[in-house]
Image: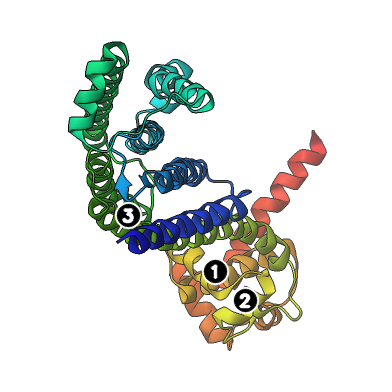
């Protein structure tokens, strides 16, 4: 049992260490406030949990398991408080931004940790291996006994208060309206995250309960389940990180496409935009974006299809050249990628209700009149 206990602890420590290293190493410069809050929150919970798991290596000595180890209780309470605070942040309550809130909830474990270090340094710390020993030890030193009881009562009160905050934050999350413009895929990720909160809450309660027992079995079971949960969480976190990186890359592409398109629209030679049978890959390469980014831009930003968009680009360029220059219509049709004059006339009439020549004749005089008026002025 002892070997199994240490093996489970070591495995959990390794998983936590790898996860923390990955979170600090990856996506630090990703410009997404929601993701950065998630990354830092996960890292904070994992770090406090790592400290707690490391402290449990000291609870077994002389073939017995220490009950209510001061170090383990303090560190686990800190980990659980951190988890609840960041969960509230996920639900839209920013309690974590208040220094006073952190000071209120962490004052008791911090004071007790300081006293624990002093007791250890002076050799006055006594390990207790059962509830009966706790009562017997209390009979010899009532002050220390009641100090421990009051300290545990205060931690219990703080945990109950934190749980009430978590419930209130969840109610707030359920009532608030869905943010406008948030992609459906991102909403699905958020819904998945909500399911992890009760799972981690149950595991934390199980960890706290194991500190009251004098057996290694509860530690082994809870730490094994926690290891599986953390592995699963880190895998989901990595997938979500790649998803956010994809969104960031796509946002940059969506900003780049209109700028590059303005430059490309003025270029007639070797321009796939004005080819009769241009493909999505050819135009994406000319715009210096991926095929998927261009496809997403057309469908999601412009709400159009690729054939409709290319037809619009050809017709727009043809119309500009028709009014700005005196080039022949047949020449413009070829330059803009129309297979024939018939195809051009069909597309132009569908848009303007007249042929290109009629449109030029009708528009040019108006332009000349405006020029004459401007000269007279």
Percent coordinates x, y for residue 103 in the rendering: 44, 18
Mark 1 vs mark 2, foreground winner is 1
- Assess whether mark 2 and mark 1 are in contact (beta carbons under 8 angstroms): yes
**In the figure, is residue 121 to the left or right of 124?**
right
Mark 3 vs mark 2, foreground winner is 3
User: Which residue is the site of mark 3?
Assistant: 223
Residue shown at the point (77%, 39%) measured from the top left? 374
Helix, strand or loop status at disc 1: helix
Helix, strand or loop status at disc 3: helix
Of the numbered discs in the image, which one, if any, rests on residue 294? 1
CA gap, disc 3 to disc 2? 54 Å
Query: Could you tell me which quadrant the N terminus lies in?
Result: bottom left
- Assess whether mark 2 and mark 3 are in contact (beta carbons under 8 angstroms): no
Residue 327 falls in image quadrant: bottom right
CA gap, disc 1 to disc 2? 9 Å
Of the numbered discs in the image, which one, if any, rests on residue 335? none
Mark 1 vs mark 3, foreground winner is 3
Question: Camera-side residue: 370 or 289?
Answer: 289
Percent coordinates x, y for residue 269 in the rendering: 76, 79
**In the figure, is residue 85 to the left or right of 254?**
left
Q: Name which of mark 1 and mark 2 comes first in the sequence.
A: 2
Percent coordinates x, y for residue 270 in the rendering: 74, 81
Q: Residue furthest top?
A: 143
User: Which residue is the site of mark 2?
Assistant: 283
């Amino acid at each position: 049992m002892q070997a199994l206990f240490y093996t489970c602890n070591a495995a959990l420590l390794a998983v936590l260490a790898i996860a923390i290293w990955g979170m600090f190493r990856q996506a630090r410069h990703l410009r997404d406030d929601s993701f950065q809050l998630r990354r830092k929150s996960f890292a904070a919970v994992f770090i406090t949990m790592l400290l707690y798991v490391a402290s449990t290596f000291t609870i077994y000595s002389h073939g017995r398991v220490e009950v209510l180890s001061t170090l383990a209780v303090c560190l686990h309470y800190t980990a659980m408080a951190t988890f609840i605070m960041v969960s509230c942040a996920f639900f839209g309550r920013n309690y974590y931004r208040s220094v006073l809130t952190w000071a209120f909830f962490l004052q008791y474990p911090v004071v007790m940790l300081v006293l624990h270090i002093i007791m250890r340094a002076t050799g006055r710390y006594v390990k207790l291996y059962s509830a009966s020993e706790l009562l017997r030890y209390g009979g010899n030193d009532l002050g220390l006994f009641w100090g421990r009881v009051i300290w545990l009562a205060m931690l219990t009160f703080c945990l109950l208060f934190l749980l009430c905050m978590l419930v209130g934050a969840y109610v707030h999350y359920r009532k608030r309206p869905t943010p406008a413009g948030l992609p459906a895929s991102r909403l699905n990720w958020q819904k998945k995250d909500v399911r992890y909160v009760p799972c981690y809450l149950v595991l934390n309660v199980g960890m706290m309960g194991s500190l009251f027992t004098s057996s290694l079995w509860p530690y082994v079971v809870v730490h094994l389940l926690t290891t599986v949960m953390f592995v699963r969480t880190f895998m989901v976190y990595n997938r979500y990180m790649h998803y956010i990186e994809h969104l960031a890359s796509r946002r940059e592409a969506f900003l780049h496409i209109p700028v590059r398109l303005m430059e490309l629209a003025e270029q007639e030679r070797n321009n796939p935009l004005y080819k009769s049978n241009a493909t999505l890959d050819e135009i994406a390469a000319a715009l210096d974006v991926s095929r998927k980014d261009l496809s997403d831009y057309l469908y999601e930003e412009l709400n159009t299809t690729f054939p409709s968009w290319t037809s619009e680009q050809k017709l727009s360029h043809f119309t500009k050249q028709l009014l700005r220059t005196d080039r022949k219509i047949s020449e413009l049709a070829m330059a803009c990628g129309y297979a024939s004059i018939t195809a051009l006339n069909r597309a132009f009439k569908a848009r303007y209700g007249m042929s290109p020549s009629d449109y030029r004749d009708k528009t040019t005089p108006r332009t000349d009149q405006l020029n004459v008026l401007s000269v007279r002025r």
